[in-house]
Amino acid sequence: MRKGIARPLDETAIGLRLIACLLVALIILTASRGQAQEIRVPDSMAEVTLTFAPVAKLAAPAVVNVYTTAPRTERSPLFDDPILREFFGRDFGPGFGRRQPSSMALGSGVVVSANGLIVTNNHVIRGASEVTVALADLRQFPAEVVLTDESTDLAILKVEVDEDLPFLGLGDSDDLEVGDLVMAVGNPFGVGQTVTLGIVSALARTQVGISDYSFFIQTDAAINPGNSGGALVTTDGRLVGINTAIYSRSGGSVGIGFAIPSNMIRTVIDSAEEGDEVVRPWHGFTGSTVTAELARSLRLDRPGGVVVERLHPQGPGAKAGLKPGDVILAIDGYRVLDERALRFRLATVGVNKQAYLEVYRKGKTLTFTIRLVLPPDEPDLAPRRLRGKQPLSGAVVGNVSPAMARRYGLEDVWDGVIVLEVPSKSTARRFGLRPGDIVRELNGTEIVDADALERQLDEPVKRWLVVIERDGALRRIDVTR
């Protein structure tokens, strides 16, 4: 059990009551099937009533409403009138004609520790200037944003109270199975706390496209706008997911809702307790999903898995013994169907911890142990501004390291030269360079660091051919003097 996630609420009696109710219902069902001729009136309420009220009573006090206030700048259309602009001047001065009313947004959150730590969705509090949390007993408190993580769409809030708050302990989302009963608790449409019941419809949904670490629990428990950040709870009262999104053409629930699994939530909570940013391990290799066509070429009996493409020479993958062409089939016994599933599994392992990889290589299935570490911050960034009569003139560039690439959201990049700044009136801007671009080649020569780039730019040539990487795709800039 992890720090700060112990369960403070006594569920023994509740669990026994639920078990008793289920046993009674099962006995009645069995008896009715075996003795179809016998018809009798039930002897007690337990024989006719199956209730999830104990679970709701356990979960409800730990689910909160999250209200956010954000400034919204508006400008009267009168100030865009060409005649008035000519009369008053074209610039009107900074902010002229603007007013800043507040806009309100509503979501849900879950208390996960007695000292007031709350998990919600990042999109619930994104851009907020103020965040207020309303407890189930209607008391309201200002909340501090402790940590935000766009990659998982999770955020951690903190409220200061003079007492221990009821909270939900984290369950193991890997213990879920399709068909398990789950309960969603939140504040849909702002009508007030609402509890809905459903089942787990699917697991490991990775093609939803909501976050970088898409790996969702799908449920048919009714989830609507305002439920975001609310709890997905098992029948024993454990938090197994944060309700995040729905699939809907109308905006209302159609029975397809998605929740972030608790095993990912746990990593974000741990980061919040230890610092102010999410710390994720680095595996040091890139890969792609094994399609049906690729599976045939690799002589695999089915699609699924991740084929290793590139390895950092000093990365954890290379040190574990992986090679290009290996297919990762499972991590710690859990099957890996695609690249997003691999990211999720490795992200939940943690820094300086080991994972066991089941790997297919040339007709054999092998096992490797990989020890995950923090991405290294080498080589040094060493930023410098490029000068001279060449197409990158004016841009500020630096060396790429795995740590630097991650800060720019470039998970699969760990070498080369990154563009840090492109002034508006520079030659580099004129030729389409942007911050975040990776310079890969110059006139047919691979660029490994900023020093090599500067040396190549000093070469006297009549034509420049620059290859850059942007959003995972290669682009070419062709310039003739």
Image (cartoon, rainbow, N blue to C red):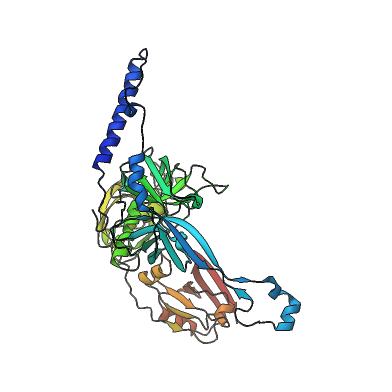
- Of all residues shown, which one is farthest toward the bottom? 388
Residue 239 visible in the shown view: yes
- Of all residues shown, which one is farthest toward the right? 83
Q: Quadrant of the C terminus?
A: bottom right
Q: Where's residue 14, x and y in %?
A: 28, 40
Q: Where's residue 81, x and y in %?
A: 73, 74
Residue 477 in which image quadrant: bottom right
Q: How many discs appear?
A: 0
**What residue is drawn where x is 56% and y is 78%?**
429
Residue 171 versus residue 472 in the image, above or below = above
Residue 25 visible in the shown view: no
**What residue is drawn where x is 59% and y is 73%?**
99
- Of all residues shown, which one is farthest toward the top? 37
Q: Where's residue 269, x and y in %?
A: 32, 60
**What residue is drawn where x is 54% and y is 83%?**
390
Left or right: 321 with respect to 121? left
Which residue is at the front of the view, 427 or 218? 218
Residue 22 versus residue 83 in the image, above or below = above
Left or right: 215 with respect to 315? right
Residue 354 versus residue 233 in the image, above or below = below
Q: Where's residue 24, x and y in %?
A: 30, 27
**What residue is drawn where x is 52% and y is 87%?**
388
Which residue is at the front of the view, 217 or 428? 217
